């Protein structure tokens, strides 16, 4: 049942019959309504007018969303192909946090190896709002040459700096077809996603799952590219596959905690 509608109906009942419920119930209704109002997610629209409302006290670095859990210490290992080379991607949830736009975020370290050579290292910054939605507040990324020297930091951004804005990467209760900006830094970070299936079947080395969440991702920076991702409750992302554009695929092999 719709939470706001339920709260409104119960509030009306209390007004008609003020003795029908104790003050604690009325306080609970007020709290629920306040939380719901705070957790309104941004409506999709042009990036130039994208300004999501961020109340810093409504976020936590503890990310427990069932589709995108980030327990400290978890390491996820993916293998596949990227840029035409064998790929190994290692993602670890760090105990560290970082303050971005006044929000305490969880630092997730991502290391990408191509043909057994470290080619990209990234620190991603996530936080969860009071309703369980997961937001992305930025990243520090570095592309490396064969000697380990940084050759580019393209794509790095911090929400609140130079017009950059945070985005939603996973709803608490995913809605089919609703689009979200995962990030916004004009000309540098413009990823968009939407849920296209809530009961997809996917097989990866880690296992076979029958009720996965499937999303598609696009970006105006690469209009010819379309990717799809699969998420499993309690695990998180298990696969990323290209549907259009350069052939790329990463599948979950192992999870360590």
Image (spheres, grey):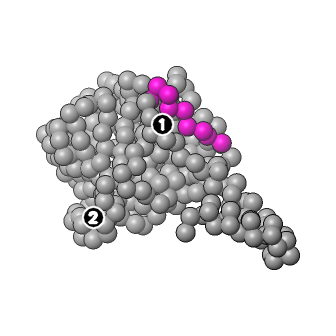
Cα separation between marks 1 and 2 = 29 Å
Assign the magenta stretch its main secondary structure: loop
Q: Residues within 10 Å of mark 2 (few under 14, many from 20)?
A: some
Up the image or down, 10 lies above or below 130; here it is below
Image position, residue 254 (x, y; %): 30, 63
> What span is colored magenta in the figure?
47-55
Image position, residue 237 (x, y; %): 35, 56
Q: Nearer the viewer, mark 1 or mark 2?
A: 2
Image position, residue 188 (x, y; %): 38, 26
Question: Helix, strand or loop at disc 1?
Answer: strand
Question: Helix, strand or loop at disc 2?
Answer: strand
The quarter of the picture where the C terminus appears is bottom left
Residue identified by numbered label 1: 138
Residue contact between numbered discs 1 and 2, judged by CB atoms under 8 Å: no
In the rendered image, is residue 172 in sight? yes
**Residue at image location 52% in from the left, 24% down from the top:** 163
Q: Residues within 10 Å of mark 1 (few under 14, many from 20)?
A: many
Residue identified by numbered label 2: 200
């Amino acid at each position: 049942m719709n939470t706001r509608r339920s709260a409104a109906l119960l509030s009306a009942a209390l007004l008609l019959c003020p003795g029908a419920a104790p003050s604690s119930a009325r306080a609970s209704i007020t709290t629920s309504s306040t939380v719901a109002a705070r957790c309104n997610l941004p409506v999709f629209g042009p990036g130039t007018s994208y300004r999501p409302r961020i109340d810093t006290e409504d976020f936590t670095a503890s990310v427990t969303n069932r589709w995108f859990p980030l327990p400290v210490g978890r390491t996820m290992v993916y293998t596949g192909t990227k840029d035409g080379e064998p790929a190994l991607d290692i993602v670890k949830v760090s105990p560290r946090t970082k303050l971005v736009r006044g929000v305490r975020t969880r630092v997730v370290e991502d290391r990408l190896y191509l043909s057994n050579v470290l080619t990209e290292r990234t620190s991603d910054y996530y936080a969860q709002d009071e309703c369980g939605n997961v937001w992305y507040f930025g990243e520090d990324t570095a592309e490396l040459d064969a000697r380990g020297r940084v050759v580019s930091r393209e794509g790095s951004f911090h929400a609140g700096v130079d017009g950059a804005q945070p985005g939603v990467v996973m709803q608490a209760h995913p809605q089919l077809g609703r689009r979200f900006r995962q990030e916004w830094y004009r000309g540098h970070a413009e990823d968009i996603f939407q849920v296209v299936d809530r009961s997809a079947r996917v097989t990866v080395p880690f296992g076979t799952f029958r009720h996965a969440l499937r999303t598609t991702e696009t970006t105006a920076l690469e209009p010819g590219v379309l990717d799809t991702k699969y998420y499993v409750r309690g695990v998180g992302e298990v696969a990323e596959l290209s549907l259009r554009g350069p052939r790329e695929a990463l599948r979950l092999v192992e999870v360590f905690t």
